[in-house]
Amino acid sequence: MTHKPMKTLPDYLRKDLTILSVGLNPSLPSVEAGFYFANPRNRFWRGLNQSRLISETLVPSVGAQQTLFEKYSMGFTDVVKRPSANASALRAADYRKWSPVLKDKIIKYNPRVVWFHGKLAWQHYLRRAEGVNESSTQWGLQDTRVGLSIVFVTPNPSPANAAFSLQVLVEWYNELADLVART
């Protein structure tokens, strides 16, 4: 029996990125569109455009993602590469399989800052890749590094995470911009 390869988003990785953006896993709309945070209700692109992380307005697209990669040295990947309609569809086996893979990518490519979108993404990574059961994660700069990379956690921009306004996301993205400027 042959298995069809899983359709997912490609990683945008290279040595010495300034920022590596790490989502929990690809959404189905993102996989279909071919770029990260493609769901029109996701607030990543709006927050990014209003923040100091970039100096121009980007229209969500494969081309905009490429601009972030080439001009702003921002890469993209996920804790789990298996797409799903929502986070509740992920299982412990997904995290056990993919978190160590993410750790290997971070060590290999050595981004200056690893940007986790959401405490859930960071906590699942920590538990499955680092063996650390952390339930009291704070937003922002973390005490733990991955290899030589600094870790920064912001609220997830997913429409399922409406508890955080666009303005709050922008404030955290600006904190990240400030961190990048001083490191």
Image (spheres, rainbow, N blue to C red):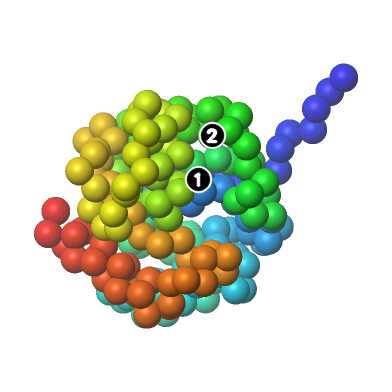
Of the two numbered discs 2 and 1 in the rendering, the one whose residue sits closer to the viewer = 2
**Disc 2 to disc 1: CB gap under 8 Å:** no
Where does label 2 land, which residue? Answer: 95
Q: Residue at x 35, y 75 (%)?
A: 168
Q: Is mark 1 on a helix, strand or loop?
A: strand
Q: Residue at x 58, y 41 (%)?
A: 81
Q: Is mark 2 on a helix, strand or loop?
A: helix
Q: Residues within 10 Å of mark 2 (few under 14, many from 20)?
A: many
Give the side of residue 23 with respect to residue 143, left or right: right
Residue 12 position, x and y percent, is 47, 47
Question: Farthest residue toward the left?
Answer: 182
Q: Quadrant of the N terminus?
A: top right
| Observer-nearest of 146 and 180 | 146
Where does label 1 land, which residue? Answer: 78
Give the quadrant of residue 173.
bottom left
Give the quadrant of residue 56.
bottom left
Q: Can residue 147 be seen in this view?
A: yes
Give the side of residue 3 with respect to residue 141, left or right: right
Residue 149 position, x and y percent, is 25, 41
Q: Residue at x 57, y 69 (%)?
A: 159
| Observer-nearest of 146 and 19 | 146
